[in-house]
Amino acid sequence: MSDSDVKSKRITATGSLAVGPARIRQIQLKTASGTPRLTITDGSGGSTVLDLDFNASTTHSVNIPAEGIRVSDVFVSAFTNVTAATIFFN
């Protein structure tokens, strides 16, 4: 049984999800052409907790194992050649 309900937010650019402390559980995204990349930091200016490159022009699902990645706030610092992403967290 989960400790809390999973929530989600859709993003189309860099910036904070403004959700406060959270555990990132999964990411779904649609990439464009070029060299797609998604980087997430522990809040604005924090350390990088996830840095991923993707194949172009397709959809991707990234499952985070175990209890997810704990952050003080989900901050997307790189959103290169990505059309949109939905980040699931609790």
Image: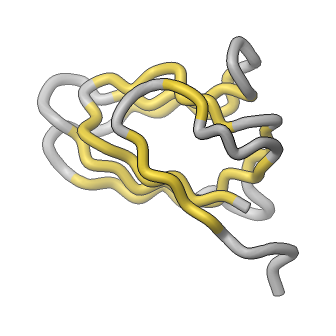
- Residue that sits furthest to the front in the current view: 18
Q: What residue is rendered at 54% in x and 29% in y? A: 76
Q: Position of residue 28 (x, y in %)?
A: 41, 56
- Mark count: 0
77 left or right, relative to 3? left
Q: Position of residue 69 (x, y in %)?
A: 74, 47
Q: Position of residue 65 (x, y in %)?
A: 68, 61
Q: Which is more toward the observer, 14 or 52?
A: 14
Q: Quadrant of the C terminus?
A: bottom right
76 left or right, relative to 67? left
Q: What residue is rendered at 80% in x and 61% in y? A: 67
Residue 71's place in the image compared with 10, above or below, is above
- Residue that sits furthest to the bottom in the current view: 1
Q: Position of residue 32 (x, y in %)?
A: 16, 36
Q: Which is more toward the observer, 71 or 17?
A: 17
Using the rendered view, name the quadrant where residue 20 is placed: top right
Q: What residue is rendered at 53% in x and 20% in y? A: 77
Colour convention of the picture: secondary structure
Q: Quadrant of the N terminus?
A: bottom right
Q: What residue is rendered at 81% in x and 79% in y? A: 2
Q: Which is more toward the observer, 20 or 87?
A: 20
14 left or right, relative to 45? left
- Residue that sits furthest to the right in the current view: 3
